[in-house]
Image (spheres, rainbow, N blue to C red):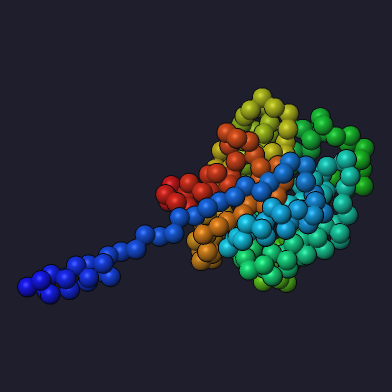
């Protein structure tokens, strides 16, 4: 009798459903960073964390921050190098295209004359094009957040926009996201990770202020909640 009880308990142990591994999401966003600065801190802020997945979104400061533009070819090389080093470290990469911007709001903080050669909108469209090409060449997954916002009319100066503006936040910004924008980005990233069967044991979100967000609202925090609760 005791023998049968033991076998029954043993079978319960082996047949019991195992709990899914909880996802850890690390926010490795730093405000003002360009792709060149991401390369400099890649080892410390990403590879040292031994990630299984890296969500990479960079390009806004490279091409919009008039404090020091990075030419588009250098940007491409930097992104390619980031992908190569991340993959060599054993992680899978998800590229994300940064949002477009609202030029008239951007010009409240940057001299419009510095964009005479190429408009801010054209600059960010060029970033998108480069990332689409790099993703295809490198065979890495890509979330086209830039196009999603435009197609859904969520990247303008209206109250419904996901970009901060006077109508939705009282701020003349036109580049960064409102909290609802971070939530939306997190949901889209989570859907992409699920569809691509990414290992989400340790996810590092790598980028600039669009990744960093704030203590109250940032997409990595929302992403961790979604990955662990499904909500």
Residue 99 appears in view? no
Location of residue 26 in the rendering, given as x and y in whole percent from the top left corner: 59, 50
Q: Residue furthest top?
A: 170
Rendered view: 40 above or below 173: below
- Report the quarter where the N terminus lies: bottom left
Rendered view: 79 above or below 214: below
> Is residue 130 shown left or right of residue 5?
right
> Is residue 118 shown left or right of residue 216?
right
Location of residue 220 in the rendering, given as x and y in whole percent from the top left corner: 58, 47
Q: For residue 161, which quarter of the picture?
A: top right
Q: Residue at x 64, y 63 (%)?
A: 93
> Is residue 156 shown left or right of residue 115?
left
Near-viewer residue (51 or 104): 51
Q: How many marks?
A: 0
Residue 229 appears in view? yes
Q: For residue 126, which quarter of the picture?
A: bottom right
Near-viewer residue (85 or 131): 85
Location of residue 212 in the rendering, given as x and y in whole percent from the top left corner: 66, 42
Q: Residue at x 58, y 63 (%)?
A: 52
Location of residue 115 in the rendering, given as x and y in whole percent from the top left corner: 89, 42
Near-viewer residue (128 or 69): 69
Q: Residue furthest left?
A: 1
Q: Residue at x 87, y 41 (%)?
A: 66
Rendered view: 182 above or below 204: above
């Amino acid at each position: 009798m005791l023998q049968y009880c033991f076998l029954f308990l043993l079978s319960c142990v082996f047949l019991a459903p195992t709990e899914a591994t909880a996802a850890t999401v690390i926010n490795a966003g730093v405000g003002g960073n360009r792709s060149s600065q991401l390369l400099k801190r890649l080892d410390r802020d990403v590879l040292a964390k031994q990630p299984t997945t890296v969500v990479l979104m960079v390009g806004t400061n490279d091409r919009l921050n008039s404090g020091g533009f990075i030419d588009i070819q250098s940007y491409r090389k930097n992104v390619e190098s980031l992908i190569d080093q991340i993959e060599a470290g054993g992680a899978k990469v998800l590229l994300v295209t940064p949002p477009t911007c609202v030029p008239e709001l951007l010009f409240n903080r940057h001299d419009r004359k510095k964009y005479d050669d190429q408009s801010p909108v054209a600059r960010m469209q060029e970033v998108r094009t480069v990332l689409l090409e790099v993703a295809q060449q490198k065979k890495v997954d890509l979330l086209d957040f830039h196009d999603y916002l435009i197609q859904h009319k969520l990247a303008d100066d209206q109250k419904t926009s996901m970009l901060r503006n006077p109508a939705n936040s009282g701020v003349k910004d036109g580049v960064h996201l409102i909290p609802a924008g971070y939530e939306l980005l997190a949901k889209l990233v989570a859907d992409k990770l699920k569809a691509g069967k990414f290992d989400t044991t340790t996810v590092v979100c790598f980028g600039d202020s669009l990744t960093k967000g704030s203590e109250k609202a940032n997409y990595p925090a929302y992403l961790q909640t979604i990955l662990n609760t499904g909500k």
